[in-house]
């Protein structure tokens, strides 16, 4: 029987595969430590093909992080639309994110690597600032809408709550990157988040400071 020739990948498919392979290499070595040769080997191409799609290793890293950011943003928008109220949207977003972090260590590691890279790469700094502000404003607006729809307590310290949620989410990235999941399990982290979110519900007790 004749062997059918392997279908050639489209440029978009090749680019996607390069990014998927690069994410794993970056997670292990960081952008500084990773070598384009390692990335090329991981996705089964030569370095020339790599540079055909991306002008530099840094550009590839930024593209990978941009896609991660865009996917998260789309998912957050979907959750906010589907949730019965803003309190439950907040719960779904943050408990869901913890589960993603714990099941996707490369993503957790690359968030930390990306933050470190902002100190020397203007492109990553711009992405980091945009990512931070977009997420900050999204969560703040969701909490304020929760006060309006009656699911979130009206006396809440909104800004303090935003920073607690985002700080805890960031902390779980560090836990997973360092391999400390036994120290703080996914189940325990999810439980802590749910307890905090229960505390910001309307008529739930003392004000969250």
Image (spheres, helix red, strand yellow):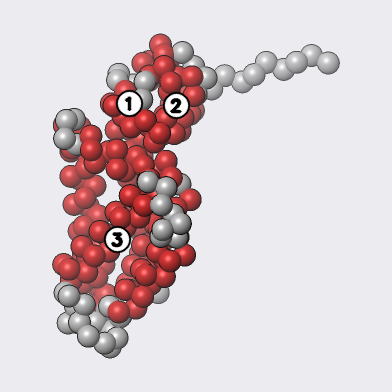
Disc 3, SS:
helix
Query: Which residue, given by chain and number where applicable, does mark 2 sit on?
Result: 18
> Do the residues bearing badges 1 and 3 touch, measured as CB atoms within 8 Å?
no
Residue 165 vs 148, above or below: the answer is above
Q: CA distance from mark 3 to mark 2?
A: 31 Å
Q: Which quarter of the figure is the N terminus placed in?
A: top right
Q: Earlier in the sequence, mark 1 or mark 3?
A: 1
Q: Nearer the viewer, residue 59 or 186?
A: 186
Query: Which residue, given by chain and number where applicable, does mark 1 sit on?
Result: 33
Name the residue located 38 percent from the left edge and 19 percent from the top edge: 36
Query: In the rendering, at what x and y percent does residue 160 appear?
Result: 17, 68
Q: Nearer the viewer, residue 70 or 169?
A: 169
Disc 1, SS:
helix
Name the residue located 47 percent from the left edge and 65 percent from the top edge: 187
Q: Earlier in the sequence, mark 3 or mark 2?
A: 2
Query: In the rendering, at what x and y percent does residue 52 appear?
Result: 38, 15
């Amino acid at each position: 029987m004749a062997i059918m020739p392997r279908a050639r990948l489209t440029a978009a498919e090749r680019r996607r595969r390069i990014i998927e392979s690069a994410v794993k290499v970056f997670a292990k070595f960081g952008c500084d430590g990773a070598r384009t040769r390692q990335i090329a080997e991981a996705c089964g191409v030569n370095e020339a093909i790599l540079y055909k799609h991306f002008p530099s290793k840094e550009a590839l890293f930024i593209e990978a992080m941009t896609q991660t950011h865009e996917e998260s943003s789309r998912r957050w928008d979907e959750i906010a639309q589907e949730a019965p109220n803003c309190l439950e949207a907040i719960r779904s977003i943050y408990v869901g994110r913890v589960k993603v972090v714990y099941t996707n260590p490369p993503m957790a590691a690359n968030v930390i690597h990306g933050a470190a890279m902002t100190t020397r790469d203007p492109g990553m700094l711009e992405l980091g600032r945009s990512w931070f502000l977009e997420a900050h404003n999204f969560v703040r607006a969701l909490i304020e809408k929760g006060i309006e729809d009656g699911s979130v307590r009206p006396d809440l310290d909104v800004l303090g709550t935003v920073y607690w949620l985002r700080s805890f989410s960031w902390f779980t990235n560090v836990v997973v990157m360092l391999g400390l999941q036994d120290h703080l399990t996914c189940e325990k982290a999810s439980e802590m988040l749910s307890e905090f979110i229960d505390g910001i519900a309307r008529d739930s007790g003392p004000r969250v400071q």
